[in-house]
Amino acid sequence: MLICFLGLSVHLKAECRDKLSLLIKQYIMSLLKDNMEESYGSDWPTEQKVKRREMVVPKARYIFVHEIPNECSYKTERERTYTSCIEDKDHMVGFVYYRFTLEEEIPILYVYELQLEPRVQVKGLGKFLMQLIELIAQKNRMGVVILIFQKTMNFYLNKLRYVISAVSPSRVDPLIGVEKCYEILCKTFGHEAKAILEAEVAYGTYLGVLVPTSMLLRSQVNDRVALAIKLHIAAIINGSYFVPNSSSVHQS
């Protein structure tokens, strides 16, 4: 797919994790470091290790953005040889990393990374890539697109009309949310996903303690959710969580 943005010609290429060459993996980590190290500060070394592991999980899917040099973009379709123009990693200018997953019976497209080199930002490319992701989600009958973003980046809220999810830290616990530098955003495509992920946060009781009902989405509490609830309760006991007054919240 060849696309032009404000004088920038790019080619998009989809790949799975088993097709990633060593050079591509090095490029991914290099761009992540350039774009994210300052935001994470002293936490970056730990986060870098996490991202390196995530990069090659079996479900990882990528869309790579390759810049088409002028000498290639001005050639006719017959004369153009994409192999010589786009396979060199030096012409790669960004990527999207996403996965298909299923959580609480809701099919989710989870965007792990959208990274572009600074020189190709603010050209409409990021918006186009997210619209492409949404199209992929709908074509594959996903109920929602979910992503994590830094609070300083209002691009997703203002231009793409994503909303802060009910499972985002600031919605689950306002006090804890203030301390976090990120939010969890979503755009839903079905009534069930919307009812769960965009709903006002309500609280219910579990083992006699108020917990967000986002932890109790179904009547059956699986091991993962049960563990999350136990950790939540432990945080309350340790005094690190704020629990709303029972008179001001919904009791289930």
Image (cartoon, rainbow, N blue to C red):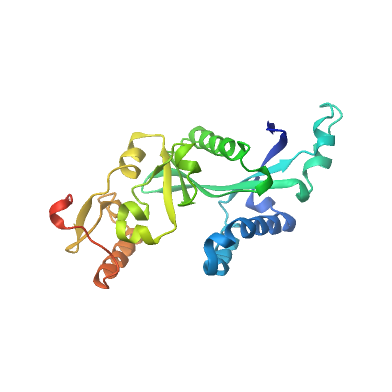
| Residue 73, x across and y down, in percent | 80, 32
Rendered residue at 58%/66% (across/down): 49
Q: How many labels were placed on the picture?
A: 0
244 up-or-down from 239: above or below: above
The percent position of residue 228, horizontal first and vertical second, equals 33, 62
Residue 9 in the image: above or below residue 33: above
Residue 79 position by quadrant: top right
Q: Which of these two is toward me, 106 or 46?
A: 46
Q: Where is residue 239 shown, x and y percent of the image?
A: 26, 71
* Front-most of residues 143 and 123: 123
Of residue 34 and residue 27, the one placed in the foreground of this image is 34
**Is residue 52 depicted above or below 137 in this figure?**
below
Q: Is residue 102 above or below residue 125?
A: below
Quarter holding residue 83 = top right
Write the residue at 59% across / 62% down.
37
Horizontal side of residue 120 vs 213, given as left or right = right
Rendered residue at 37%/45% (across/down): 105
Residue lying furthest left: 247
- Residue 1 visible: no
Residue 12 appears left or right of 78: left
Q: Residue at x 52, y 68 (%)?
A: 43
- Which residue is most to the bottom? 238
Residue closest to the eye, 184 or 180: 180
**Residue 192 seen in the figure:** yes
Position of 26 with respect to 195 (left or right) is: right
> How far across and down, in percent of the image, does residue 166 sit?
33, 48
Can you say which quadrant of the picture contains the N terminus?
top right
